[in-house]
Amino acid sequence: MPVVRDLRVLLRLTNFRRLLTVRLLSQSADGVYQVALAAYVVFSPERQTSPGAIASAMAVLLLPYSLVGPFAGVLLDRWQRRQVFLYGNLLRAALAAGTAVLIVTAVPDWLFYVSALSVTAVNRFILAGLSAALPRVVDEKRLVMANSISPTAGTLAATAGGALAVALRVVAEGSDATVVLLGAAVYLCAGLASLRMARELLGPDPELVQSRLGAAVASTVRGLVSGLRHLAERQVAARALAAMTLLRFCYGALTVMVLMLCRYAWSETESEGLTLLGLAVGISGAAFFAAAAITPWAVARLGEYGWVATCAGVAAILVPALGLPFAPAPMLIAAFILGVITQGSKIATDTVVQTSIDDAFRGRVFSLYDVVFNVAFVAAAGVAALMLPPDGRSVPLVLSVAAVYTVVATAMTRWR
């Protein structure tokens, strides 16, 4: 397989192996920690979970990416990246251990969320730093290959971490605090693994750093504003981003519904619900990889707009057909199909943005893209919290999501 061959080529590079190890450990710890949060917020027997609590948890997990993300690069270009991986992961290990203590002591929810928010906020620096450091360990000829393999490997590591957390929680009957401590231990390993690289290896070069932090932050704000103006002038990209935002909104709303169904409608025990959730997450993960295989072929025949319109049209039909029975089997089938649809649309949208935005503005537009992508998901959780009954069965929500998919399909067909 080409992917296996490319990976073998890259693994011959010592420093790439060491950087990849840090990524795999960091993202597997993310998977453990996030599943532990979901288990505590949604499936703890002593908590009466509500859609509002799920929306709050999603805000904690996703908003730091949106709010901190555009400014993370300013600091990453001033700090030695090896030190960011070392101290960032050590800090996350300590904060995650603190989260475990908070779970055991049953503190007020707001204090728990502050702790979780701190852990996920640091994550933005780690992930951005891993991408920024890659050109320092791979030559330019192999950089595209490395950019393709590293994030995919990280996603697999996060999925494996989540599966490990589910196994510890369900099979070994571990507590939520125990699972969080496992995540803290893996964060610690990630920090220590970074010590295998020289301190100066990953940059940045001191002579290229902007001297004043305030000036760097101000230039970032000005850059985002100019990027927004440039996007407004590029209708092809702006329309694709608008469509992707709505598709992400639909996916977020349905995710909250599935969480509530797993918790109350489909299971009699906490373990059954968590197992079903793990199955749904695994199916969605498989769908993302299927989308990566299908989308190039589909875009070659339909074009980017045509593929997004097709995805939205299929979703408009299948969401009511598979969702309204509110049964596990049809909903798991829908989870796979919607995973393909959402990720396939994102790949097409990424391509539109890359090809229609000037190179000088591309980074800023993708920063804005990251913001709206995550904010749409959190907003969807908020709307779902208002519409969902306690057991998660909501016909109005399913029909509303289908209507949004129909609007996207119609608009993209017209704009095509």
Image (spheres, rainbow, N blue to C red):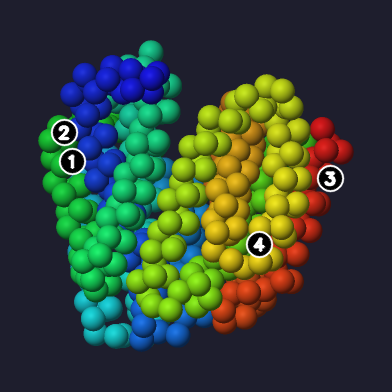
Q: In this view, does 389 lie to the left or right of 88?
A: right
The answer to whether residue 213 shows anywhere in this view is no
Q: Earlier in the sequence, mark 2 or mark 3?
A: 2
At numbered mark 4, what does the secondary structure look like: helix, strand or loop?
helix
Residue found at the far top of this picture: 141
Task: Give the number of marks.
Answer: 4
Tag on residue 197? 2
Image quarter where the C terminus lies is top right
Q: Which three-letter amino acid code belongs to the residue tagged 3?
A: Thr
Pair 2/3: label in front: 3
Q: Are marks 2 and 1 in contact (CB under 8 Å)?
A: yes
Tag on residue 271? none
The answer to whether residue 89 shows anywhere in this view is yes
Q: Do the residues labelled 2 and 3 touch (CB within 8 Å)?
A: no
- For disc 3, the marked residue is 410
Pair 3/4: label in front: 4
Q: Give the distance between the C-alpha atoms of the residues marked 1 and 3, in whole angstroms.
A: 49 Å
- Quarter holding residue 196: top left
Q: Which three-letter amino acid code belongs to the residue tagged 1?
A: Ser
Q: Are marks 4 and 1 in contact (CB under 8 Å)?
A: no
Q: Which three-letter amino acid code belongs to the residue tagged 4?
A: Gly
Residue at position x 25%, y 65% from top? 171
Residue at position x 32%, y 32% from top? 133
- Across and down, in percent, residue 84 comes to 26, 46
- Across and down, in percent, residue 182 comes to 20, 61
